[in-house]
Amino acid sequence: MGEVGGKTSLRTLGGGEGGLFTTKFESLLGWARKFSLFQYPFATACCGMEFFAVAAPKYDIARFGAEAPRFSPRQSDLLWVVGTISQRQAPVLKRIYDQMCEPKWVIAFGTCAACGGFYDNYTTLPGVDKIVPVDVYVPGCPPRPEQVLDGLMMLMKKVADGNRVAEIAEPGLAAKIAAREIAKPGS
Amino acid sequence: MAKIVLDRIRERFGDAVLETSSAQGDEVAVIAPDRWLDVASFARTDPACAMDHFIDLTCVDWPKRAARFEVVLMLRSSTTGKRIRLKARVPETDPKIASVTGLWLGANWFEREAYDMFGVIFEGHPDLRRILLYDEFEGHPLRKDYDAAKTQPLVPYRPEALDKLPPFGKDEGMPWERPVRPGREHSEG
């Protein structure tokens, strides 16, 4: 957990260099934020069950510093949209998002939150990105907890790098990244 | 099974029973809409019928029929175990029928749902308003002429998100514009 990502890493200089702590402030901040994501679980549907599984001891998002749910949007900085959002519920979601303090991130958990899923009709919002910007999409109906962890790790990396480009946590993502890292050490 | 109940209703109401059928053990009586409450009340109170268990109330849209909306009431007796289905057909121009909430309290939300989805008005209902959709919603979505692709968002969509946003391709996920399929008509009217 102690590693610091990328080339803009936190490093201490040797004693001969005055013991100064040099880093870019943003990367220190990003590093701190990435391990203290306070989450607001907006769980509306069956994906909520998988979310509980991710939060419970077996998969345990506490390992990533994201274990503390805050049911007040003012205290949270990661919005999990877990499940189908109906048109009737959309104003509530929008309001929750607006009440969250900056910086804030959004994970669309499951296919319904990402694009409406198979609810192609008058009731359902066709993806929460229609009303709030999304950082990570975790597809699946519902996604497996491993895939959600992939998505969370993807988000942590984005938080550390200050990267706001939306991405999809595809199935098997972690394996792909691991394979790439083994193939090219140090990259 | 419940033929005896059907016979009793037919015997009591005569012309108000427009049609009956009892295929596969399903006893169905189509009632004239102006006698709806009388028949329902009889089915509930008559000792031979004793339909004290309200199961379901719903509606079917038959767009080509003159009396377009068919209100369907499903009942069961907890004493005799018999079941019966009552139907009444109301036209689009005057989609009104008596409420049965006075007989079975449980019919309350079902009638609200039928009103919400089809626009059938249940006269005498204590609180007839939308139950699932929001008040701002225009029209009744389970009517066959409600455009399947039409949504009525309460929150305006972000202008940049009107189309699919990256990382999704334009052809991924749910279609934003549903292709219109001409000539797709309902088999029965």
Image (cartoon, coloured by chain):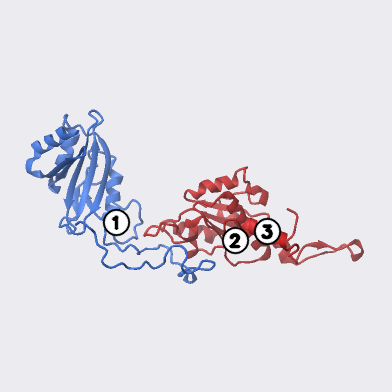
Question: Residue at 67% of width from left, 54% of height from top?
Answer: A36
Quarter that holds the C terminus of chain A: bottom right
Identify the chain of the residue marked 2, using the numbered disc in the image.
Answer: A
Q: Nearer the viewer, residue A161 or B152?
A: A161
User: Where is residue B163 drawn, in percent x and y?
Assistant: 46, 70
Q: Nearer the viewer, mark 3 or mark 2?
A: 3
> Are the residues under marks 3 and 2 on the same chain?
yes
The answer to whether B82 appears left or right of A180 in the picture is left
Q: Amino acid at mark 1?
A: Leu
Question: Residue at 22% of width from left, 34% of height from top?
Answer: B51
Q: Is residue B10 above or below residue A169?
A: above
Q: Nearer the viewer, residue B138 or A180?
A: A180
The answer to whether A98 appears left or right of B80 in the picture is right
Quote the CA–CA distance across marks 2 and 1. 39 Å
Marking on residue B121: none
Q: Which residue is mark 3?
A: A179
| Colour that chain A carries in the picture | red
Q: Earlier in the sequence, mark 3 or mark 2?
A: 2
Q: In which image quadrant can residue A37 be found? A: bottom right
Q: In which image quadrant can residue A151 be found? A: bottom right
Identify the chain of the residue marked 1, using the numbered disc in the image.
Answer: B
Question: Residue at 26% of width from left, 38% of height from top?
Answer: B54
User: Where is residue A39 drawn, in percent x and y?
Assistant: 59, 53
Marking on residue A104: 2
Q: Which residue is mark 1?
A: B142
Tell me whether the residue at label 3 lies in contact with that at label 2, contact meaning CB atoms closer than 8 angstroms. no
As helix, strand or loop, the secondary structure at mark 1 comes to: loop
Dot 2, crowdedness within 10 Å: few (<14), some or many (≥20)? Answer: some
Q: In which image quadrant can residue B81 be found? A: top left
